[in-house]
Structures are given as C-alpha cells and as structure tokens.
Image (cartoon, rainbow, N blue to C red):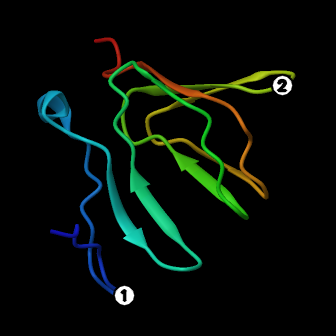
Amino acid sequence: MALRHAGPGEIVNLAPLGGGVARAKTVALVNTKTFEAVRLVSKGKVIPNHQVPGAITLHCLEGRVLLSLERSQVELAAGQRCFWTRAPRTPWRGSRTHPSP
C-alpha cells in the first residue's frame, strides 16, 4: 500500500513529538515532481549523504541536528532552519533528541 502524502492546502502537524519520538519514523509528507517535504527522525543516528536536485531547506523541529560540511560544521537547534541553493553532500546527525532541562 502506498503512503498517503499531504495534498495542496492540507494542514500538516509539525509539532514536536516529545516522548512520542521513540516510536516515530521518518516519513515523506509531500512528494511531487518539483517539491519534497520529509519529517526526518534521526534519534542520534547518522543519516547518510542525501542528494536532491535544486534547493534544500533544513528546519530543526526539536532537539539538535549537526551537519559536517567540507570546511565547517552547522548545528541547528529547535526552531532554527538553514537554506542552500544546492544540497550539501554531507551526512546529518541528530545530536540530541531533546534539549537539556
């Protein structure tokens, strides 16, 4: 059975998962010929190099994500995002599922 993706104008819940992150899986939210939106759940694991054609926006919903680029590292905290005109070929790592108290 094919996964159902969100349609135009449909609301998608991106609220933090909190304690539900342990059961959460990565899921494609929208997938068209020109646009893809994925809720990526890493739970501290490395996500291998991922290449997409065109621009990419990475938005950290909760916890932190670390990208090791060629000449630097970028770490995003919950609520932060960054944009590239071409996706960097780099592995991503969720460095911490939840912020420290």
* Three-letter amino acid code of the residue under disc 2: Glu
User: Residue 19 bears which disc, if any?
Assistant: none
Q: Quadrant of residue 3?
A: bottom left
Q: Of residues 8 and 80, which is closer to you in this image? A: 8
Q: Residue at x 31, y 84 (%)?
A: 7
What's the CA distance linking mark 2 and mark 1?
Answer: 36 Å
Residue 2 x/y as whole percent: 22, 70
Residue 57: percent from left, percent from top: 61, 54
What type is the residue that disc 1 sits on?
Pro
Question: 98 above or below 37?
Answer: above
Give the foreground label among 2 and 1. 2
Image point (76%, 27%), residue name: 69
| Res 49 → quadrant | top right
Residue at which label 1 appears: 8
Q: In this view, which residue lies farthest toward the bottom?
A: 8
Q: Residue drawn at (31%, 21%), measured in percent from left and top? A: 98
Q: Is residue 46 above or below residue 5?
A: above
Name the residue carrying label 2.
70
Q: Earlier in the sequence, mark 2 or mark 1?
A: 1
Secondary structure of the residue carrying tag 1 is loop
The local secondary structure at tag 2 comes to loop
